[in-house]
Amino acid sequence: MGLSHKLEMRQGQSLVMTPQLQQAIKLLQMSNFELQAFLETELERNPLLDRDEKALMAAETTRQPTDMTTELKSEASTAERLEAMDTDLTNVYADEAKADTANREAAAGSSDGGWSSLRSHSGNAHGGGDDMDYAQNVTREITLNEHLTDQLHLAIHDPARRLIGAHLIGMVNEAGYLSGELDMVAKLLGASLSEVEAVLGILQGFEPAGVFACDLKECLAIQLKEHDRYDPAMQLLIENLDLVAKRDFVGLERVCGVDHADVKDMVAELRALNPKPGNAFGTLILQPVVPDVFVRAAQDGTWHVELNSETLPRVLVNNQYYARVSATAARDTDKLYLSECLSTATWLVKSLDQRARTILKVAREIVRQQDSFFLEGVSGLRPLNLRTVADAISMHESTVSRVTSNKYIGTPRGIFEMKYFFTTAINATQGEPSHSSEAVRHRIKRLIEAETAKSVLSDDQLVDLLLAEGVDIARRTVAKYREALGLPSSVQRRREKRAYG
């Protein structure tokens, strides 16, 4: 059979991923913070892109001005709102510092709501209010490394030992534990192992108590020694943390050689310790969650879905600048560069507008599908998948998946990630509609929280209760959901309730 060359013409279709199409896909799955960072880069790179200052000014002017009367009325009604929500300020300020708590309570106790204290500190040290140096009043959270280094300079004066101490401080992780081997430190610094261990013994007395420990047992032991509570019985308890985790109080009584009351007190004391002392000094900057979409109740009983205007990017194409510069461009390379900048800027503005429309479209369909959640809470969640939403709005599943990535919805019940509303289905009995796995998980948690020492529910009993409520679920699924919630087995829960009940 001979080989020959010939020309053929064929017609076909294929999707070409152009750079602009690839970038549009990336824009769709970016969070609002990632999008802002991307736009800042584009604004610096493309001279034809400008910020929409008019839109920014319009957004500022549409905000309702807050005068003193409005603020005081808002403060006066805070207690009434908290009482109506069956909560108090300890829930609202659950994670605030002790100093902030004291300042807030002092302000609440004053007759003018703390305004006199604010006025008394409004001036600087020289008595002038206009020359205040605000930079001096800005506080920064000290890191664990800085806190330990300050103590090192006070505790150790020998240069050689201080060098060893500085190296050991650099080996402490964010939780406060020492990562690394001491013999390697001694070899690296040319010091004896005994000298390194001696320095480590000094460092383990630093605050917060428990730092420079190699493991959890040593961390707890250091804290107990700090409180002079590391007796032989407590030492045996520390060495048998696996029994503590299993809540095997009978085994702990036998191992430690003490009675039930002593074991109960020892475990309570152990729980009061800090297993990660370094976490008191935050080194990571937490990025706050800003909703991309808001859901509010409308007067007609429906739900009003709108985009968060503060997260919407405001950029536009400066056509006047392009016309002025292109008219004076003489070289072909300059004209080509301006043409590419105009094309990129125009495409970016259109892509951002399409991105916003797509997010709003998907969010509205999610709210429509999960309307019972906004009325009833987690128990009202329905099974939902990407295909259902994609078919309803005539989009591809991959597009819906990208839209719901790193996007959040602000609702009257809190802020939720869009993917939270997509849950698998659990079969129902007697031909009823399926149940959401998240709703079933929430129901399991509620049943276990309502237990008493005499009515601890096993996984089989949980299955029976759920079957009575119309949920067809297997025992292994109940066990999987319970473990995912961090809830121990019925045996461990019964031991704990009998010990602390």
Image (cartoon, rainbow, N blue to C red):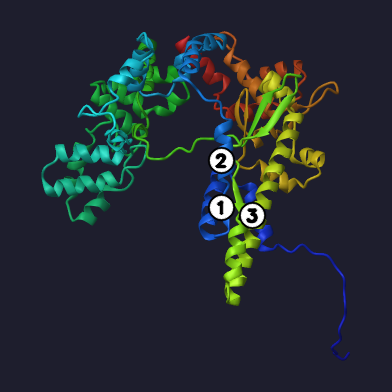
- Where is residue 236 shown, x and y percent of the image? 33, 25
Q: Which residue is mark 3?
A: 348
Front tag of 1 and 3: 1
Work out whether residue 368 or residue 299 is closer to the camera in this orientation and state it.
Answer: 299
- Where is residue 123 shown, x and y percent of the image? 27, 26
Q: Which residue is mark 1?
A: 50
Residue appearing at x 50%, y 17% in the figure: 70
SS category of the residue bearing label 3 = helix
Label 2 sits on what residue type? Leu
* Gap between marks 1 and 3 measured at Cα: 12 Å
Query: How crowded is the residue under tag 1: few (<14 C-alpha within 10 Å), some, or many (20+)?
Result: some
Quarter of the image for residue 279 reads: top left
Front tag of 3 and 2: 2
Q: In the rendered image, is residue 310 in sight?
A: no
SS category of the residue bearing label 2 = helix
Vertical arrangement, residue 346 with respect to residue 333, above or below: above
Residue appearing at x 45%, y 18% in the figure: 68
Query: How crowded is the residue under tag 3: few (<14 C-alpha within 10 Å), some, or many (20+)?
Result: many
Sequence-wise, the earlier of marks 2 and 1 is: 1
Quarter of the image for residue 488 reads: top right
Vertical arrangement, residue 252 with respect to residue 86, above or below: below
- Where is residue 198 shown, x and y percent of the image? 17, 41
* Residue lying furthest left: 158
Contact (Cβ within 8 Å) of mark 2 with mark 1? no
Q: Where is the N terminus found, in terms of image quarters? A: bottom right
Sequence-wise, the earlier of marks 3 and 2 is: 2
SS category of the residue bearing label 1 = strand
Q: How many marks overall?
A: 3
- Where is residue 48 shown, x and y percent of the image? 58, 59
Q: Which residue is mark 2?
A: 56
Residue appearing at x 40%, y 28% in the figure: 241
